[in-house]
Image (spheres, rainbow, N blue to C red):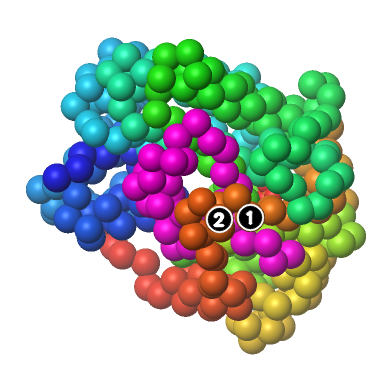
Amino acid sequence: MTRTLITGGAGFIGGHVTRRLLDRGESVVALDDLSTGSRENVPADGENPRFRLVVGDVRDRRLVDELVQDCDVVIHLAARIGLKLVIESPLKTMEVNADGTESVLAAASRYGKRTLIASTSEVYGLATKIPSSESDPISFGSPEKGRWSYACSKVFDEFYALALHRERGLRATVVRLFNTVGPKQSAHYGMVIPRFVRQALAGEPLTVYGDGTQTRSFCYVGDVIDGLMEIVARDESVGKVYNIGNPSEIAIVDLAKRVIELTGSDSPIEYVPFDVAFNAGFEEIRRRVPDISRARHDLGFNPTTTLDVVLKDVIESVRAPQPVAR
Ligand code: UDP
């Protein structure tokens, strides 16, 4: 039975990966500091004998060494996420994303474990070639803007993983995730879909930042996990970088209108200037679309879930009564 260590295993994506692996009869250890993750995303203590949650920090080298040694596969998702947190505390972003990844990758390399590390579409930054491909040059903004600390730390992670692969034979794959969405994504860290859905259901204004013409391409978490599973299963993905996302692009104001329609809400749209929504550390990305031809070709990756299906799923999960806290 494959034993997978998932760092950030109690996060939004980590919780979905955990469930997928447990459903396949595999065994999972989730390492999570519960800073943005939640116990509600994973089985409770004792609920599944093939699952264990370890509450700890990815920068704790002794703990990471022990957990990596005991597993067959490492899926490294732990990271400081959410633009609001990143802009408020670039220092913590750099420390967790660079130092934490270094800790995990060094252990994976020491014990020769198959490793998948999560990077982000944010690394494409201000690149103007749309759609963005893995081999494109990347260009993000000035270090005077705190936003780019996230992209910069993730680029460091990518270089480090690929260097360990080339020089020490680490079987690592880098995955750039593009706006992953679905049920259980928290609204607390700024992510637009859980925010809009909650605002619409509460009858509050939907806060569209800027003029709303900026675009994103949202990918259903279930489709993302299909891609991650294929990567881990295929040796030919070792040493490569993959865009994992859905190329279908939407302007944020159109997203707001669609959420209003699907919830049947009478909420208005409120335009919030970027400098009111964020402080000076902000600089907006106008368009973000993945070129997924590499993932399609190598992995058979084919994200089919439409945005409407995702939105209905998220709306239903927010409407559903929340479990009583134990
Ligand atoms: N956004 C918005 N209103 C919100 C939250 C986000 O208009 O209440 C916009 C944000 O400016 C960005 C897009 O939605 O253009 C996606 O934001 P998110 O934080 O989900 O992801 P990211 O910016 O990392 O792509």
157 to 301, vertically: above or below: above
Instruction: Verify CB contact (< 8 Å) between mark 1 and mark 2.
Output: yes
Mark-to-mark CA distance, 1 and 2: 6 Å
Q: In the rendered structure, find residue 191 and report the number of the disc placed on it.
A: none
240 magenta-colored? yes
Q: Is residue 184 visible?
A: no
Quadrant into which the N terminus falls: top left
Name the amino acid type tagged 2: His
Report if the beta carbon of the residue with label 1 is closer than 8 angstroms to ligand 1. Answer: no
2 to 194, vertically: above or below: above
Left or right, 176 with respect to 185, comes to right
**Residue name at image x 44 percent, y 62 percent:** 222
Residue receiving disc 2: 297
Magenta segment, which residues? 221-249
Q: Name the spot of residue 254 as percent of width and height, x first.
A: 78, 72
Give the structural element (helix, strand or loop) at label 1: helix
